[in-house]
Image: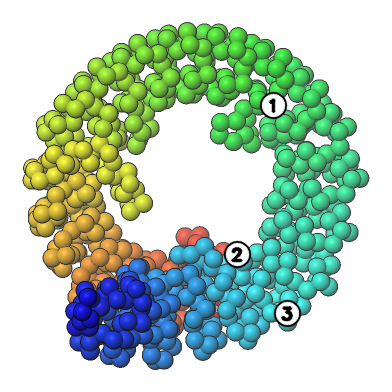
Amino acid sequence: MEEDWDDPDFVFNAVRRDFKSFERASTELRHDQDFVRRVLLEDARAFEYAADEVRSDRDFVQDALRSCEVDGCGVLLAMPDALQNDRDLVLEMLEFGSEDAIEHVPEALLKDAEFMLRASLIRGEFWEDEADVVEWASEELRSDPDFMLLAIQNGEGNYAHMSEKLSRDRDFVMKAVKIRGIAYVATAPELRNDREILLAAVKNDGGAIRYAPKELQSDPGMLLAAVRTCSDAFGFAAEELKRNREFISAAVTTCASALRWASQELRNDRSFVLEAMRHDCSALQYASEELRSDRNVALEAVRSNMKGLVLGDSVLRYLSPEVQSDREIVLEAVRNRGDALQHASQELRCDRQVVMEAVRSDGRALRYASEELRCDRQVVMEAVKSEGRALQDASDSLKGDQEVVLEAVKHVPYRRVVLKYASQELRSCREVVLEAMRKDPSNLECASPELQRDRELVLDFFRSPPRGGKIVTRDSEASWILNPGLRQASRRFQSDRQVVLAAVRYDGKVGLLFAAPELRSDREIVLEAVRTSGVALKLASAELRSDREVVLEALGNRGDMLEVAAPELRCDRNVVMKAVKNCGTALRWASYELRSDREIVLAAVWSEWKGVLYARVELDREIVQKALEHALEHGHVELQDDDEVACVHRI
């Protein structure tokens, strides 16, 4: 094939084979921002060979990074020095770039306290490895007490990067372990023998005791403090403490699992175990086998308030088979928790009264009943009244009983498909299907083919609100919103304007996901959509995302939709002000100039304290004060003392 370095397709294919090929492209192509962006998406390393004007264009670089598909490292390495040292641009690179981007940050920024703290916050929000940011900070910063205290607060693993000097500074270490107890690990050996420091650490994180000297691990007061925040801390107790009744009693009051570390003598002490169970029933699992076969202990357990048991658990599981066959005990157990039926003997799972009590408490206990009782209409009706999904475990004949199925639909949790458990005949019943769709539109997928093609059924669904009110949609729910049932309806009715209008009035994002692409350019439809769900703006056509009225309507209930507004609207002061008043962090999507507008920054901070992260102005006392007040008022930040407040003011 003849080489043609003026041909975009030829050059692009060459870059795919070797990014260095971009150097041979024509001057025109290396100046073409659209083509350069296309090349960057393929291999960001080719940016090195783009025209100097393109590599120096701050707006172009910023947009490339925001695409979330361009490798930030490749772009950073090819940027001129002026942009490589642009604090705000590099912060965006860390937010949108690859996880190892911090390794390529210029040394000057690694010495910049404000940059590094913002970087650790951004990485903590968007990546799991926030600790790696502080690892790259300069030695000077890692020796700065104020910087390191804030860094430790920002990320769990940042304590590991304190300098040796700070690890020997008692005042600093005391403050650090109060913020994160596990910071005790990084302290100098001589300070690990300091009882006061260890006590402060285990009060924050009991797991810190594993790194303490043996003599401090044997301190009763220290262990009790550690157990309050970490149950496994008791495993480090000395043997004599495990036999100490008073000490074990105090520990079990704090954490039931401490009983497992007690001596055999105490775990066989009836009064001691009963007292432990009054604090937490799950302590029974650590009692001796003899006590778990004791009928009086069993009655005490099943009559308790079940404090300390996790969902799906029951004290009945910890008792002996003989006790699990005791009708009186099992009746008490299933009245408290229906799912305890699974631990009852086979004989009692066939007992109608026992099963009836169980399904009244929890309908899903029907699955543990005998086959005969799962055919009992009265038992099944009680079960579906308690939990609609119990229909799954009913007999085939009762899955075809319209009254039972409608009762199940009525009592199924929202966003749960129940129609799939009904008989084929009832899946063809319009009344049953419509009721099921109002609980979860996915039920349409389980309806008969004829009803899936029924236009009036789909219209009736969209015209009537779901049971319990209108659904609030969020990005994370997108996989549910356009569920299989609506996808099937969408293929048949997505170009039907009347159906789509009904859909967007039901829920804007549901409706636009439902609509055909050409209707996403329909101004009336999109306006209706963003009125009910601002996030629907993401699905609108590019033209309508440039429509000021449409965008303002969306920002009224989802300020963060500024992200998808047209670039010219992100430069519109009134548009940005509306966005940040609704969602402070929407400031990150505003134009560079407006992120430097003090009034807009204040409005963002007042709405949400994290808005301060995206400001591009020098943060004066008033802005920081408002951020702190808002954060503290809403419980977003816990500041340990005045010194820490002073540290935050430094940002």
**Which mark is on residue 318?**
1
Report x, y in % for residue 530.
Answer: 20, 55
Q: Which mark is residue 583?
A: none
Q: Is residue 178 left or right of residue 20?
A: right
Q: Amino acid at mark 1?
A: Tyr
For label 2, the crowd category at 10 Å Cα-Cα, with few meaning under 14, some 14 to 19 and many 20 or more, is: some
Q: Is residue 612 visible?
A: no
Q: Residue at x 27, y 63 (%)?
A: 561
Taking depth in this image into account, of 561 and 254 the one nearest to the observer is 561
Q: Would you name the residue on which mark 2 appears?
A: 156
Q: What is the three-letter code of the residue carrying label 3?
A: Glu
Residue 235 in view, yes or no: yes
Whole-Å distance between the Cαs marked 3 and 1?
50 Å
**Residue lying farthest to the right in this orientation:** 240
Residue for point 49% across, 82% down: 105
**Left or right: 269 with respect to 141?**
right
**Depicted 449 relative to depicted 401: above or below:** below
Residue type, label 2 = Glu
In the image, which disc is placed on residue 164?
Answer: 3
Task: Tell me the element at label 1.
Answer: helix
Left or right of 618, for residue 328: right
Look at the numbered disc 3 and give the secondary structure of its residue: helix
Q: Disc 2 versus disc 1: distance between alpha carbons? A: 37 Å
- Whether pointer 2 and pointer 1 mark residues with C-beta atoms closer than 8 Å, the reply is no
The quarter of the picture where the N terminus appears is bottom left
User: Height in image: 476 above or below 438?
Assistant: below
